[in-house]
């Protein structure tokens, strides 16, 4: 039963939506990598590899067809960018419209580090190290009773 | 000590402005890659039209509206009356691009609701739709006299959009020589 499931999964993975075109193993790897890197335009936040929406199926078929026709990954991506814009790429190039996207997280990280540094420095300045009360420490460690008030008078 | 009070207030205000701004924008509407570019080439058979075929060259010479639609598209029915109205009010011919449909279903749809199009191009495979960067129907393109795409509406046209944006744009383009 389990083996049957695996065979079915393998078949599903191995058959691109293209149907008509057949790809060899290296082409298939490229197909999977490429479709995982292209964004579905209707079901945003999913790749076309993950999506079963008709448009995603069409685009997967186009990717398969173009791989079979010997087009490079760059050419296939450009084909889709020409039609749908850079938005289809999950890995957009660094340029005017995307610099914030690329740089933003690092800027936020930097701001966070600066805040942490400032807070730590402030804390070090304002709270002096507590002075060590050696006498009391020794008492606690030795389990001595607190010294009673001087009682020399009684003795 | 004062900055301790000012900084959180500024941060929160900035966040409110940012979130408020993003509320006014729909995440579904993507900027079109084709605005300012020549209408992608196509050569398609027609349905319910006087001519047999239509190509992108036929879009040149006139300001045209290209409306991508399908009989299975519910939103297309919603904007159907407005398409007719735009055409009547501006005199701009509307080219329908029947996307991933069957001839029979498309003809039935046109028969039932009326045909607002000057010509209907039949794109059964959807390849021309992909060339035009269509993600979901309906989409509507404004094409100027030189055959350049100038504007795009994603989703069904609303009356507000028609009055405030589309008709003024079409009239302005018609005045351009």
Image (cartoon, rainbow, N blue to C red):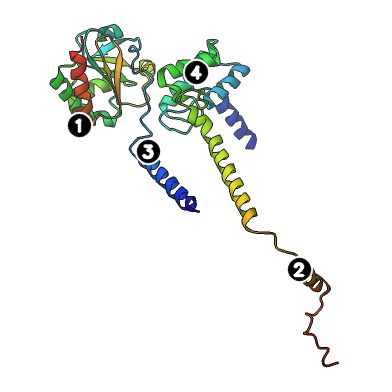
Query: Which residue position is annotated with label 4?
Result: A77
Q: Which residue is mark 3?
A: B22
Give the vertical position of A12 relative to A141 (above or below): above
Residue shown at 35% from the left, 9% from the top:
B41
**Along the horizontal axis of the image, is B67 left or right of B41?**
left
Res B92 → quadrant: top left
Q: Do dots 2 and 3 share one subunit?
A: no
Q: Secondary structure at mark 3?
A: helix
Label 3 resides on the chain identified as B
Q: Chain of mark 1?
A: B
Q: Is residue A50 visible?
A: no
Q: Which residue is mark 1?
A: B159
Mark 2 and mark 4: Cα distance apart in space: 71 Å
Q: Disc 4 or disc 3, which is closer to the eye? A: 3
Q: Residue B167, percent across and down? A: 19, 23
Instruction: Check whether the beta carbons of the residues at disc 4 and disc 1 lie within 8 A of each other.
Output: no
């Amino acid at each position: 039963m389990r083996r049957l499931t695996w065979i079915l999964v393998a078949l599903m993975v191995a058959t691109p939506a293209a149907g008509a075109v057949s790809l060899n193993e290296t082409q298939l790897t490229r197909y999977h990598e490429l479709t995982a890197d292209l964004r579905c335009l209707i079901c945003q936040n999913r790749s076309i590899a993950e999506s079963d929406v008709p448009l995603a199926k069409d685009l997967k078929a186009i990717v398969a067809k173009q791989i079979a026709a010997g087009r490079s990954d760059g050419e296939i991506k450009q084909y889709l960018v020409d039609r749908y814009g850079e938005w289809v790429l999950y890995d957009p190039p660094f340029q005017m419209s995307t610099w914030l996207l690329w740089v933003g997280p690092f800027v936020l990280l930097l701001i966070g580090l600066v805040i942490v540094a400032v807070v730590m420095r402030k804390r070090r300045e304002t709270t002096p190290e507590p002075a060590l009360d050696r006498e009391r420490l020794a008492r606690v460690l030795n389990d001595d009773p607190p010294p009673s008030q001087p009682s020399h008078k009684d003795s | 000590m004062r900055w301790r009070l000012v900084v959180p207030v500024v941060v929160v205000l900035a966040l409110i402005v940012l979130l408020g701004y993003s509320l006014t924008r729909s995440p579904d509407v993507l900027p079109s890659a084709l605005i300012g570019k020549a209408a992608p080439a196509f050569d398609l058979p027609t349905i319910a039209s006087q001519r047999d075929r239509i190509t992108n060259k036929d879009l040149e010479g006139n300001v045209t509206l290209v409306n991508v639609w399908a009989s299975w598209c519910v939103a297309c029915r919603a904007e159907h009356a407005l398409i007719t109205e735009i055409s009547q009010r501006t005199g701009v011919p509307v080219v329908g691009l029947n996307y991933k449909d069957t001839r029979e279903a498309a003809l039935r749809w046109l028969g039932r609701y009326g045909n607002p199009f000057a010509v209907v191009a039949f794109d059964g495979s959807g390849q021309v739709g992909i060339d035009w960067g269509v993600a979901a129907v309906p989409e509507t393109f404004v094409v100027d006299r030189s055959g350049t795409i100038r504007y795009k509406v994603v989703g069904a046209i609303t009356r507000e959009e028609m009055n405030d944006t589309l008709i003024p744009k079409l009239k302005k383009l018609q005045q351009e020589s």
